[in-house]
Image (cartoon, grey):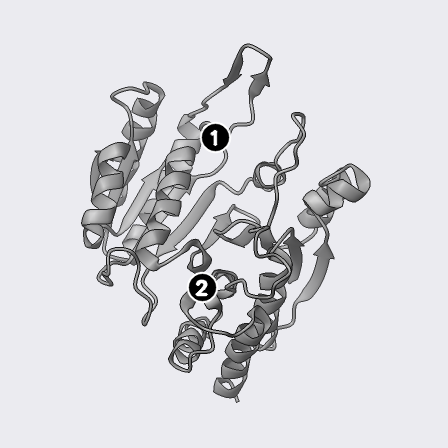
C-alpha cells in the first residue's frame, strides 16, 4: 500500500512527523511518498500544487495530511477542495468522542457521535465568480451526491446504534429539500431509525444534549461548521481527527489549521494527527487501531502532554511516547 505524506504548512510540519512515528510503530509495510504542498511551496515556486502532484497522489492509496495556510491570491484554488474533487472523496467523517482525562467546555463525557458531511457539493462546489461589486457561489445539491452520502451514513449507523439525524435548512434553502427527501428515502430503505432537524436548532442541541446523537448527516458547509463547533465538546480543535473517504481513496487530516502563531515552537498538540492514524488503521481493517486510544490515555496519565493541555512536553516528545507505548504493546 502506498501512503502519501503531506505535512503542508505551519504546525502540519510538526504534528505529521509525530503521527508518522506512531504509524511506524505498527511495523506495517507501507511505501511512503512525501509531497510538499501549500503556502510555503507557493511562496517559493508560485504554485501551491501542480498537476503532477495530483497524479502522484492518485498513484497512492491513502493520504495523511497536516495543515495548510490559505494563499493570499484571488485566483487561488483551494488545495484541499481540489484534492477532494480529484479523488472524489465524497464523505467527510468526523468522530466526536471524549478523551478520558480531558473535559470540553460543557464538562460532559457522555457523548459519542459521528458527523458525516457531504464533501464535494454544496457551497464548496468551487463554482463561483468574484468581482469588485458582485460575487456569487453556486450551491450544488444532486440526487447522486445526496444518495451516496446518505448510504455511507446509513451503513455507519447500522454498525453503531441504528440512529440517524439528517441536518438541513430546507425551510429557507429549497435545494435542501432534495437532500432531505433523498436522505429520508435511503434511511427507510436501510431500516435506520431517523429524524431530521434544522441546522440552527441542531447547533444548539449538539451542545446542550450531545448524548442524543449517533450519526449525523448533512451538507458540506453545515457539516464543516457543526463539526468544528463540536470540537469544543471534546476540548479543542487539536484533539479532533477527520477522514475524507471515497470509493478508491482515503485522506486523513486533523481538523485544526496551520496555527502560524505557534509554528516553530514545538508545542503543537499532535493528538488529532495521531488519532488520524487510528482512523487510517481502522480504514485498513488493522485490529491494532484501539492501541492508539490506550496510548493516548497512558501519556495523559503520565502528563506527557503539550502546554495547551497543561503540560510542558514538546510535540515530538508526545508523539514518541505514544509510539513507544504501541511498540511495547505489540511485543
Name the residue located 52 percent from the left edge and 74 percent from the top edge: 313
Residue at image mark 1: 121
Would you say residue 36 is visible in this rendering?
A: yes
Position in image of residue 94 (x %, y %): 40, 51
Return the residue found at the far bottom: 331
Return the residue found at the far right: 45
Q: Is residue 249 left or right of residue 304?
A: right
Element assignment for label 1: loop
Asked if the residue at tag 1 contacts the one at tag 2, i.e. Cβ–Cβ closer than 8 Å, the answer is: no
Closer to us: 100 or 59: 100
Position in image of residue 204 (x %, y %): 22, 41
Q: Report how far apart the C-alphas of labels 2 and 1 lie in the structure.
A: 35 Å
How packed is label 1: few (under 14 Cα within 10 Å), some, or many (20 or more)?
Answer: many
Which disc is residue 86 wearing?
Answer: none
Residue at image mark 2: 308
Name the residue located 50 percent from the left edge and 74 percent from the top edge: 312
Would you say residue 185 is visible in this rendering?
A: no
Which image quadrant: the N terminus?
A: bottom right
Q: Is residue 297 above or below residue 256?
A: below
Amino acid at each position: 500500500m502506498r501512503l502519501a505524506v503531506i505535512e503542508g504548512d505551519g504546525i502540519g510540519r510538526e504534528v505529521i512527523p509525530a503521527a508518522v512515528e506512531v504509524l511506524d510503530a505498527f511495523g506495517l509495510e507501507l511505501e511512503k511518498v512525501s509531497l510538499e504542498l501549500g503556502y510555503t511551496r507557493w511562496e517559493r515556486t508560485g504554485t501551491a500544487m501542480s498537476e503532477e502532484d495530483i497524479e502522484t497522489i492518485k498513484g497512492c492509496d491513502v493520504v495523511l495530511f497536516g495543515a495548510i495556510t490559505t494563499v493570499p491570491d484571488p485566483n487561488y484554488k483551494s488545495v484541499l477542495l481540489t484534492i477532494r474533487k480529484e479523488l472524489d472523496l465524497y464523505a467527510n467523517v468526523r468522530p466526536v468522542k471524549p478523551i478520558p482525562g480531558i473535559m470540553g467546555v460543557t464538562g460532559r463525557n457522555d457523548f459519542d457521535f459521528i458527523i458525516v458531511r457531504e464533501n464535494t457539493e454544496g457551497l464548496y462546489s468551487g463554482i463561483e465568480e468574484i468581482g469588485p461589486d458582485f460575487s456569487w457561489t453556486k450551491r450544488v445539491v444532486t440526487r447522486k451526491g445526496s444518495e451516496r452520502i446518505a448510504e455511507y451514513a446509513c451503513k455507519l449507523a447500522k454498525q453503531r446504534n441504528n440512529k440517524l439525524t439528517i441536518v438541513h435548512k430546507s425551510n429557507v434553502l429549497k435545494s435542501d429539500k432534495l437532500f432531505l427527501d433523498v436522505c429520508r428515502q435511503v434511511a427507510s430503505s436501510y431500516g435506520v431509525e431517523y429524524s431530521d432537524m434544522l441546522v440552527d436548532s441542531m447547533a444548539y442541541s449538539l451542545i446542550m444534549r450531545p448524548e442524543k446523537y449517533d450519526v449525523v448527516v448533512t451538507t458540506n458547509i453545515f457539516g464543516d461548521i457543526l463539526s468544528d463547533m463540536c470540537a469544543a465538546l471534546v476540548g479543542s480543535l487539536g484533539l479532533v481527527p477527520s477522514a475524507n473517504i471515497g470509493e478508491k481513496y482515503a485522506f486523513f487530516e486533523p481538523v485544526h489549521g496551520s496555527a502560524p502563531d505557534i509554528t516553530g515552537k514545538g508545542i503543537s498538540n499532535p493528538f488529532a494527527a495521531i488519532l488520524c492514524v487510528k482512523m487510517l488503521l481502522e480504514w485498513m481493517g488493522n485490529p491494532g487501531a484501539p492501541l492508539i486510544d490506550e496510548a493516548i490515555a497512558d501519556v495523559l496519565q503520565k502528563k506527557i502532554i503539550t502546554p495547551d493541555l497543561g503540560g510542558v512536553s514538546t510535540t515530538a516528545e508526545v508523539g514518541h511516547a505514544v509510539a513507544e507505548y504501541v511498540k511495547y504493546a505489540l511485543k
